[in-house]
Amino acid sequence: MNHPFGKEEAASQKQLFGFFCECLRRGEWELAQACVPQLQEGQGDIPKRVEDILQALVVCPNLLRCGQDINPQRLAWVWLLVLEKWLAREKKLLPVVFRRKLEFLLLSEDLQGDIPENILEELYETLTQGAVGPMPDGNPRRESCTPRLSSEAISVLWDLLRQSPQPAQALLELLLGEDDGTGFCHWPLQNALVDLIRKALRALQGPDSVPPGVVDAIYGALRTLRCPAEPLGVELRLLCEELLEACRTEGSPLREERLLSCLLHKASRSLVSLYGHTYAEKVTEKPLRATASGKVSPDHLDPERAMLALFSNPNPAQAWKVAYFYCLSNNKHFLEQILVTALTLLKEEDFPNLGCLLDREFRPLSCLLVLLGWTHCQSLESAKSLLQTLHRTQDRGCDELLSDACDGLWAHLEVLEWCIQQSRCCKSLLNLPGRVSTVSVQYS
């Protein structure tokens, strides 16, 4: 083939593009893929034409020529990966609808025996309509704009959750989409799932026997829930209360640890916070009334009484769980709250409860608390009790610098106590009154 002088590169690119198209017509996919990187560096309209062809290969997999060892959907997935690399080099984003539709087609291959054909068509149509574009932010009628599934389709999805939880979760995640402010989220389907979960929870607590797989269906549905950034609805609040009640019921098949693992995913952070708030309200009601020692002052602020009550619990795992939810619901860091609570106990000279609070996991904070609370001591006895509680009786596993500082404070107290004793001896010899005014200890 003769090339015009000086245009050899453009002519070779056109020839390569023709070879690329011929490979596609013959079904030689590996050779066609090998041409893509060079075609992206082509001149003129060649890159745009190749990009359009790649999108067509992904969108219309049924028109591809396939062999016996591969079907159109799997072949389209291969070209989807090629298109992603192409767009990444162009600094473009792949439309989400491409991947979602293709994932649904791949997943439906494994679900044809579990879901009727008409239901699969309805689900695909809903997925296609819902992915057309985002809903306006703050639109109160967004549910009415979202395509709704029939009651038969929702019932089939719930039965699939009971029988095959993992494929059902993957399908629901595709249908629900993402609530990231720019994407599509199938709110009617989510509301239907919430209603089904609540119905199943009531069935677990009822006298009748529960069909097999209901517990797995509850776990699977919880993994797929999306929680909006806007204020949560009443249905989700009631759901958290009923989940908590079901987990606390004696003999319940639900396990709270597994339930929480289902909620801990990116799209459900607000739901975890809501569950934590509900847990803190319900579970801390009894511990707040009294601690193991029964000496919690009613004058303490609620957060301080709560933390003291929680960590007076002889069960460390229960204490940590309740404290986590309590701090999560109040937007507080638990270490900060522990220090604030300990300083409050120190000011009130409640050293027994202070020692109980810092006796286990928070023992390394003891020397730090001595230095933070030293200026709040109002007497020699108070300073001695503080050091005796948090330094002399604790293990020396804390920071060496803090420990040395506390040793220095103890030495100062011994000197001061010796001076007071000598002063009393002199006063008794001179027949002076034995009362000594309160000594205010100040140390910097």
Image (cartoon, rainbow, N blue to C red):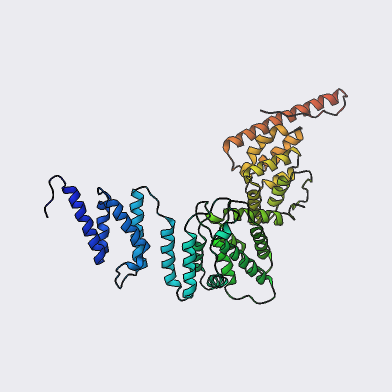
The answer to whether residue 371 is above or below residue 165 is above
Residue 207 in the image: state x and y as whole percent: 70, 75
Nearer-the-camera pick, 102 or 210 = 102
The N terminus sits in image quarter: bottom left
- Using the rendered view, name the quadrant where residue 315 is placed: bottom right
Number of numbered discs visible in the structure rendering: 0
The answer to whether residue 42 is above or below residue 196 is above
Residue 137 in the image: state x and y as whole percent: 55, 50
Residue most toward the top?
A: 430
Residue 328 in the image: state x and y as whole percent: 63, 49
- Using the rendered view, name the quadrant where residue 416 is placed: top right
Q: Residue at x 57, y 69 (%)?
A: 217
The C terminus sits in image quarter: top right
Residue 164 located left or right of residue 441: left
**Any part of residue 31 in sight:** no
Nearer-the-camera pick, 372 or 163 = 163
Q: Residue at x 30, y 52 (%)?
A: 48
The answer to whether residue 263 is above or below residue 250 is above
Residue 345 located left or right of residue 59: right
Nearer-the-camera pick, 99 or 60 = 60
Residue most toward the left?
A: 2
Residue 112 located left or right of residue 366: left
Residue 228 in the image: state x and y as whole percent: 58, 54
**Any part of residue 271 in sight:** yes
The answer to whether residue 15 is above or below residue 430 is below
Nearer-the-camera pick, 259 or 397 = 259
Q: Residue at x 72, y 33 (%)?
A: 376
